């Protein structure tokens, strides 16, 4: 076989292949994480009327265990360094951005001003 006949074949073999598809992100989405935070009392079986310090600690522990989205973890961290009323306002805003109609935890924190998430 002559070398000049191989050249076109080699060019075809080195051409661009099919484009790689970006895989869909696996795991928890940010809206799912916010929904879990908002619904922590029901999901964790907590009584919001209990001792505010204990309730806040139990909320924080459940969220730390179940919220795996990095942005959700960051939100939990940012919330935990604020007072309960500020947590309620900030969480309500994030819930609206995530497309949630309501956020039970935000409402509870704003109403009672106690039981906020702890660091």
Image: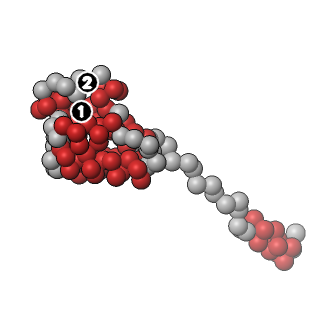
Q: Is residue 75 visible in this depiction of the protein?
A: yes
Q: Residue at 44% across / 44% down in the picture? A: 100
Q: Is residue 49 above or below residue 13?
A: above
Percent coordinates x, y for residue 69 in the rendering: 38, 45
Nearer-the-camera pick, 101 or 29:
101
Q: Secondary structure at mark 2?
A: loop
Residue 14, disc: none
Q: CA distance from mark 1 to mark 2?
A: 8 Å
- Residue 76 horizontal side relative to residue 17, left or right: left
Mark 1 near mark 2, Cβ–Cβ under 8 Å?
yes
Residue 46, disc: 2
**How was this image coloured?**
secondary structure
Percent coordinates x, y for residue 96 in the rendering: 40, 50
Nearer-the-camera pick, 30 or 116:
116
Nearer-the-camera pick, 106 or 16:
106
Residue 59, disc: 1
Specify the farthest residue to the front.
111
């Amino acid at each position: 076989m002559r070398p000049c006949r191989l050249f076109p074949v080699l060019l075809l073999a080195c051409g661009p292949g099919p484009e790689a598809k970006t895989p869909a992100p696996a795991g928890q989405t940010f809206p799912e994480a916010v929904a879990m935070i908002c619904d922590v009392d029901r999901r964790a079986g907590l009584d919001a009327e209990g001792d505010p310090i204990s309730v806040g600690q139990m909320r924080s522990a459940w969220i730390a265990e179940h919220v795996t989205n990095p942005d959700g973890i960051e939100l939990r961290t940012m919330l935990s360094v604020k007072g309960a009323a500020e947590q309620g306002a900030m969480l309500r805003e994030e819930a609206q951005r995530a497309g949630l109609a309501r956020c039970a935890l935000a409402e509870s924190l704003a109403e009672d001003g106690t039981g906020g998430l702890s660091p």
